[in-house]
């Protein structure tokens, strides 16, 4: 498994196609959410993914301050094969990218409620009540990197 970290401006057309194909297949088709999955925040993001011979196996995007929240944020987290550690690997890589590339002191996310525990294991704390985003229960969470 190989880790890739690229700013939008560094992505090849093939990489961008594979990223969008995966994201739409999960967030629009699998989760049955009709929304504009590809957005302007992608252009400001670092795109982080794990790839093997079969293609992209895990993905996340890391957004700078002000792109979606006042703080650096992580979103669009996907692990193709579930319950085998890929989620942990991609979240760890996204946090590392936030620190290294964006000098994050705090990270804000909107996590689907069913994966809240994954983020808590990294030190994220819930900062909102549960809410629906595209019909799916979410909570806002933050990770303080200054401690």
Image (cartoon, rainbow, N blue to C red):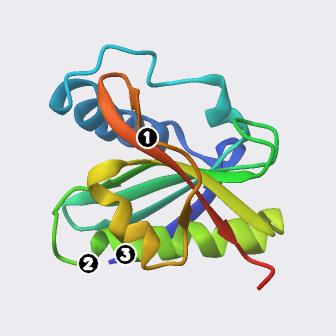
Q: x, y (%) of residue 3?
A: 46, 73
Disc 1, SS: helix
- Distance (Cα) linking label 3 and label 1: 26 Å
Q: x, y (%) of residue 112?
A: 36, 46
Between 88 and 130, the residue placed more toward the observer is 130
Can residue 85 be spotted in the picture?
yes
Q: Are the residues tagged 2 and 3 within 8 Å (C-beta)?
A: yes
Between 11 and 24, the residue placed more toward the observer is 24
Among the two numbered marks 1 and 2 on one chain, the one whose residue lies closer to the N terminus: 1
| Residue where numbered disc 1 is placed | 14
Can residue 3 be spotted in the picture?
no
- Distance (Cα) linking label 2 and label 3: 5 Å
| Residue where numbered disc 3 is placed | 88
Disc 2, SS: loop
Q: x, y (%) of residue 111?
A: 43, 49
Where, by quadrant of the figure, is residue 29 drawn? top left
Residue beneath the point at 37% across and 75% down: 88
Q: Nearer the viewer, mark 3 or mark 1?
A: 3
């Amino acid at each position: 498994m190989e880790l890739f970290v690229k700013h939008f401006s560094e992505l090849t057309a093939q990489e961008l196609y594979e990223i969008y194909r995966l994201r739409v297949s999960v967030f629009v088709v699998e989760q049955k959410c009709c929304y504009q999955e590809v957005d302007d925040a992608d252009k400001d993001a670092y795109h982080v993914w794990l790839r093997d011979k079969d293609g992209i196996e895990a993905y996340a995007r890391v957004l700078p301050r002000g792109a979606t929240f006042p703080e650096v944020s992580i979103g669009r987290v996907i692990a193709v094969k579930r319950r085998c550690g890929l989620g942990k690997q991609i979240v760890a890589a996204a946090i590392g990218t936030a620190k290294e590339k964006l000098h994050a002191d705090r990270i804000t996310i909107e996590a689907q409620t069913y994966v809240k525990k994954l983020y808590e294991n990294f030190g994220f704390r819930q900062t909102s009540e549960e809410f629906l985003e595209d019909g799916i229960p979410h909570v806002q969470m933050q990770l303080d990197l200054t401690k």
